[in-house]
Each structure stands twice: as structure tokens, then as C-alpha cells.
Image (cartoon, grey):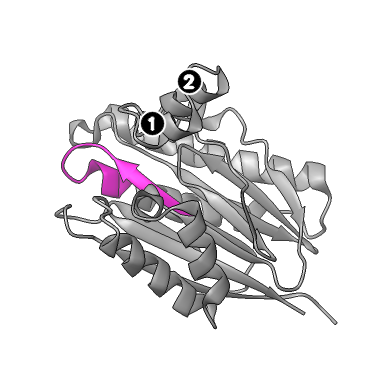
Amino acid sequence: MAIELRWGSVSIVGNVRENNEDRFFVDPQGRFFLVADGMGGQCAGEKASAMAAELVPRKLESILPAGDDAGKVTAGIDAAVAHANGEIMALSELDPEYHNMGTTLALAVRAGNRLFIAGVGDSPVYQLRGRKLEKLTVDHSLTQALLDAGTITAAEAVKHRYRNVLYRYLGTKEGGIGTKPRAVELKSGDRYILCSDGATDGLSDEQLAELLGAAPTPQAAAQTIVYSALAGGSRDNITCVTVFVEG
């Protein structure tokens, strides 16, 4: 039986922010999924995330190979991300209204029976396989760097003052240097979530796994996760794209 994907998506402003700087994109054919969390003054964050959500899919559409060759898929993803990064940087330099704008990026690209997972910044991608929740991306944050260096513990990282300070995102030179996509085999029953950090700000990993696993449909999962994060005290915009694997 062929592997099929179903998906759902929700994005809300939340209780604290005045505007929504998150954006997402879902390819109607289920080939790629994207979440972007913008940053910058005034409407700059909105602009950066909107550019990522438009430019990355458009570039993938034009250059992504038909097959599932890992090298070619990786090259296509990196080219699309680098293109969006360059355009965001260019506008940031040309228009004072968008000076220093940037955005994170969480991306999943289907090629054959694999998903290629990539991220820039701290918008995560998770896989739920059985009852095991695994984070497939690595945050490009100062807190993660300190954690990797053994300077702080995992418990300290959760509330660390630098947890939202990024050293790499789209809109910087480092944003387009390559994403090192991670390829995962699609297995029936697997569930994935791409989200902004507003979702994880209000939910623990244990809660996220429970909600993702219990939902009857991907849209129900997205809605439950977003509004549970809101009830859990998230102070940011909250965006969630869920993908269920069937077959």
C-alpha cells in the first residue's frame, strides 16, 4: 500500500502579541511543509517570515528533483533556503523599514518514502513514532550552544535568559550556509509537527507527545496543540503544522 500524508495547520496571534509574525506553507500536493517565525521591529518580522513562506516553496517547486536522490534533494533544499536568505538580507539593507529583520525556518520535504527535515533558528520539527517523541532539528540558539558545551543543564536551558537569542536565522550571512537536512523514512502511524516556539513555550515534550498521539486527525492535532499551548501560558504567536503518515 502506498504511503500517504494528511496534514493540518493552525496559526494564531496569542494573548500577548499585537500581530502575528508567524507564517506557514503547505504544498497542496504534500511535497513540502514550512513554518517561519519572524523577528524585527514594527512589521519587519511579518515581512521576513512571509518572504520565507513564499520564496522557499517557489524555489523548491522549480528546482527540486523528481526522484529521491539524497544529494540532489539536499542541494535543492539548501539552494531554496539560500535564495530566500539572500532576498531577505537584500531587502533589509535596502529598506530602513525592514532593517535587521529575520525569520526562523522549519522545513519538511517529501522525496519518495522519506522526509527531509531542515531547520534554521529555533522553530522545531518533531517526530512521534509509537509513543516516542523525537526532536529532529537542532536549535541555533545561545542556550543550545551552552548546552552543547556542557555549561548548563537541560533543566537550566528551559528557562535560561538566552533561550530565545539566536546566532543563526534567515536574514544573516549564516542563514544560507547549508541546512544539513536529516532524512527519515516514512512509516505508517508516524506523526510530525512543525511549529514556532510559541507552541513549545506553553507545552512540555510530554504534553506535546500526548496531544499529538491522541488526536483523531491532523487538523484536530494542530488545533489542540495550539490552544493547549495558549492555555499553558505561551507568550508568543503560536503556529503548528501537523503531518500524519498513513498507508
State the SS at label 2.
helix
Q: Could one spot residue 27 in this view of the protein?
A: no
**Tag nearer the camera, 2 or 1:** 2
Visible residue check, residue 216: yes
Left or right of 114 on screen, residue 82: left
Instruction: Give me the residue at 77% from left, 80% from top.
Output: 247
Give the Cα distance between marks 2 and 1: 27 Å
Is residue 38 part of the magenta span, yes or no? yes
18 vs 115, left or right, is left
On the rendered image, what quadrant is the N terminus found in?
A: bottom right
Residue 89's disc is 1
Q: Answer with mark 2 or mark 1, whichever residue precedes in sequence.
A: 1
Q: Where is residue 231 in the image (x, y as percent from the top left)?
A: 27, 64
Where residue 165 appears, as percent x and y from the top left, is: 35, 29
Callout 1 secondary element: helix
Mark 2 residue crowding within 10 angstroms, few (<14) / some (14–19) / many (20+): some
- Nearer to the camera, 22 or 190: 190
Which residue lies under the disc numbered 2? 146
In the image, what residue type sits under mark 2? Leu
Residue 54 is inside the magenta segment: no
Q: Residue at x 51, y 47 (%)?
A: 124
- Asked if the residues shown at circle 2 and circle 1 are in contact, with their CB atoms under 8 angstroms apart, the answer is no
Q: Position of residue 120 (x, y in %)?
A: 51, 38
Quarter of image, res 103: top left
- Residue type at mark 1 is Met
Which stretch did the figure color magenta?
A: 35-47
In this view, 35 is above or below 9: above
